[in-house]
Amino acid sequence: MNSTQRYRVILDELEKKRYVTVQDFSRALGVSEVTIRKDLKDLERKKLLLRSHGGASPVSSLISDRHIDEKEKINVDEKMRIAEAASKLLNNNDRIIIASGTTLLFFARKIPMNEPLTVVTPSVKVSLTLCYYPNVEIIQLGGDMRKSSASAVGTYSEQFLEGLMCNKLFIGVDGIGIDFGLTTSNIAEAHLNQYMLNAAKEVIVLADSSKFGKQGFGKICDIERVHHIITDKNAPQSLLQIIRDKGIKVTLV
């Protein structure tokens, strides 16, 4: 098999699986890992894929910002299962941060009605959902309103978070990778999320399988900052194994 034929196989596999390791390509194509790394480097130079730790993702993994109402209609079943699993991690009187995003909104809807909690959130939609929960104290972060995510960002929210320490942070992302970590499509939102990380003892990522191998414009943190990821069973197993090997708990639903 010549290089052109290998390139075709590599790109086809990435479209199907979103993330493939160098080892998997080497076994499938019957060539050395050195050859595969050279192929991946050539394809990245042509802007046909994105190289990452030990493998590659399709170039379509670069993402742009979309309105929350549009994203709420995507992968609904997966988000509901993820939200249900996340709701089981709550303890009475937990102080939690719920970041913005559609999976987090599904999570808020799955919180038991009588669960006593304190919830800090930048998301207006999360706050409006929890307004009807009699035992939930809501702290709505303020600042500049991002209309596309219906959530607050900016220095007011960041300064407020500096004075908090919560049990858990439930966070959604636009992209998860090994080299580039957790990312989102908006820099201001990524920056606020960094303050949320510093205000929580445990970081729990709620992300459906479409987020793996993708990369947003704003970096939130390295993957090593995460304690637990809840995703669906379609997430790329090769990438999940690398994540598990780093000591991060992965729950599949």
Image (cartoon, rainbow, N blue to C red):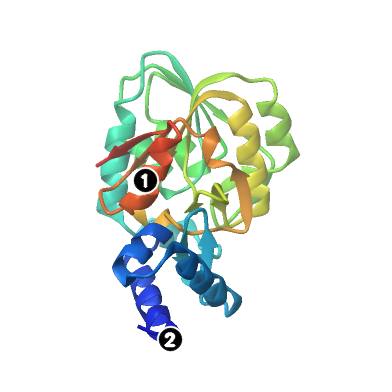
Residue at numbered disc 1:
240
Measured as percent of width and height from the top left, residue 245 is found at 41, 36
Q: Position of residue 51 (x, y in %)?
A: 53, 63
Residue sitting at x 43%, y 19%: 117
Relative height, residue 167 to residue 80 (above, below)? above
Q: Which residue shows up at 69% across the image and 41% down it?
A: 143
Viewer-nearest residue: 77 or 216: 216
Looking at the rendered structure, the kind of residue marked 2 is: Thr
Which amino acid type is shown beneath numbered disc 1? Leu
How far from the left and from the top, in percent, is residue 251?
30, 36
Q: Is residue 239 visible to the viewer in this orientation of the structure?
A: yes
User: Tag 1, which secondary structure?
Assistant: helix
Task: Classify 10 Å Cα crowding around label 2: few (below 14), some (14-19), many (20 and above).
Answer: few
Tag 2 secondary structure: helix
Of the 4 image quadrants, the one containing the C terminus is top left
Residue 22 locus on image (x, y percent): 42, 60
Among numbered discs 2 and 1, the one appearing first in the sequence: 2
Please tell me how many numbered marks the rendered image carries: 2
Viewer-closest of 21 and 213: 21
> Which residue sits at x=38%, y=16%?
116
Image quarter where the N terminus lies is bottom left
In the image: residue 197, left or right of residue 154: left
Q: Which label was assigned to residue 99?
A: none
- The foreground one among 248 and 105 is 248
Q: Which mark is residue 4?
A: 2
